[in-house]
Amino acid sequence: MIQTNRLGGESSLARFLSNNQLLIIYTCTILTLCTLYAVQPIQPLFEKEFSLSRFEAVIFTTVIMLPLGFAPIFYGYILETFSSKLFLRNAVLILGILELCFAWSDTYPVLLAIRALQGLLIPAVLTSLMSYISFITPKDRVQQAIGYYIGATILGGFVGRLLSGVLSDYFGWRLFFVLLGIALIAMFGCLNFLSEEVKVDFVKPKFSQIMDVLKNKTFFNIYMMMFFIFFVFQALLNFIPFQLKTFSSTMGYGKVGMMYAGYIIGFIISIRILWMIRLFKSESKTIIVGIITYVIGLQIFHINNYMVMFGGMFVFCAGFFIIHSVASGLISKLAHEKRAISNGLYLSFYYAGGTVGTFAPGVFYHYLGWHIFLGLLAFIVLGTLLFALRLQHSLH
């Protein structure tokens, strides 16, 4: 009798998972983004515990983001021979095992190597998940499903940062990575309930095709603008934990993690972006409004007060997600037959800028201080207005 009930329970769970494949995909997306960003708010803790330089501490985010810059262009050649479902499940399993190894490691080179290995897996995992969404969702609901996927990436980025900070305060930094590792390993089992096989949409472009897209002035202006926009975004998000600990050394890492709450505004903006484009009459004008909002948000961080900075993060993130949502949609709208290559190049420029932003501006922060650091970032954002104005000209 007990055995029958247990089997019945297992059967019910199997049916639930089989009937809720999108829920599995969104949960896996959240956990993957937790893996990507969880270290960011507690980098000052690593700096102190392992006697690292600030540069060594911020590289924890750099090494995991680095593969995201070239993945959209080159992963198509590397992964075309793999079974998509088998690869996705094993990649998630390895991510989970690496999280457990990260939690138990005591030397900086090993911790860094683990982050680098995870960085190689994450782009392929995210691309596979997006392909599954397109495969299992009816055509008339794909756009909505992708919108929820974007929401899951935003939620994962915030939850990972918040929980790693909160748990570090109460239990030390290792517990969160143990729990995340266990969750990813459990996800390995859940992914078995996905449909058997999909075609993963990795791009496999020729060099001549890449050059053709880059010669398009409209696309090139968008790519360069987003390189510097995400450069600034990651620069602020990667160095703000150090500044918070500088003006309040007793501040808990939970409060540092909560600072990223402004990130959630991205979900609201991503689902309301068409309304904003109609409000400002065109995509290029909406981008310019986003850039101005972005700069205003940056200025708020000159005030070394937690609540002021907390509010500033909402303004800053609102500006960023306005620009990003319009620019990514514009690429898809204009690309036509070269959509896959155009979107792949967009992601490559975007993540390359973010990767450089996680460490390069740190020289200014280290030697010239927070206010000069913010001034540099504001100067770079204002410089992107040039690309936005050129974009506006090319669209009219």
Image (cartoon, grey):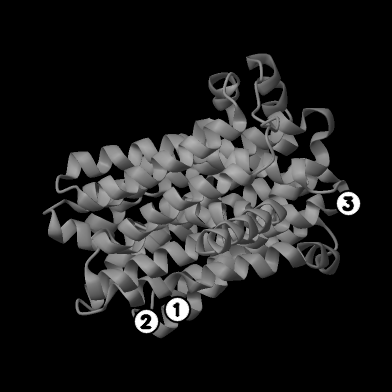
Residue type beneath disc 3: Asp
Viewport quadrant of the N terminus: bottom right
Label 3 sits on a secondary structure element that is helix
Q: Label 3, on which residue?
A: 140
Question: Mark 3 or mark 1: which comes first in sequence?
Answer: 3
| 334 with respect to 239 (left or right) | right
Q: Nearer the viewer, residue 362 or 89?
A: 89
Q: Label 1, on which residue?
A: 310
| 385 with respect to 333 (left or right) | left
Q: Residue at x 61, y 38 (%)?
A: 128
Q: Residue at x 52, y 51 (%)?
A: 230
Circles 2 and 1: CB atoms closer than 8 Å: yes
- Whether residue 359 can be seen here: no
Expressed as whole percent of the image width and height from the top left, the position of residue 161 reads: 40, 64
Residue type beneath disc 1: Phe
Q: Label 2, on which residue?
A: 306
Crowdedness near tag 3: few (<14), some (14–19) or many (≥20) residues, C-alpha within 10 Å: few
Q: Residue at x 69, y 40 (%)?
A: 195
Crowdedness near tag 1: few (<14), some (14–19) or many (≥20) residues, C-alpha within 10 Å: some
The quarter holding residue 320 reads bottom right
Q: Nearer the viewer, residue 106 or 271?
A: 106
Question: Mark 3 or mark 2: which comes first in sequence?
Answer: 3
The quarter holding residue 168 reads bottom left
Q: Is residue 166 above or below residue 229?
A: below
Q: How far apart are the two marked residues, 3 and 2, measured between alpha carbons?
A: 44 Å
| 78 with respect to 181 (left or right) | right
Expressed as whole percent of the image width and height from the top left, the position of residue 105 reads: 19, 47
Q: Is residue 285 above or below residue 59?
A: below
Q: How far apart are the two marked residues, 2 and 1, measured between alpha carbons?
A: 6 Å
Q: Residue furthest left?
A: 51
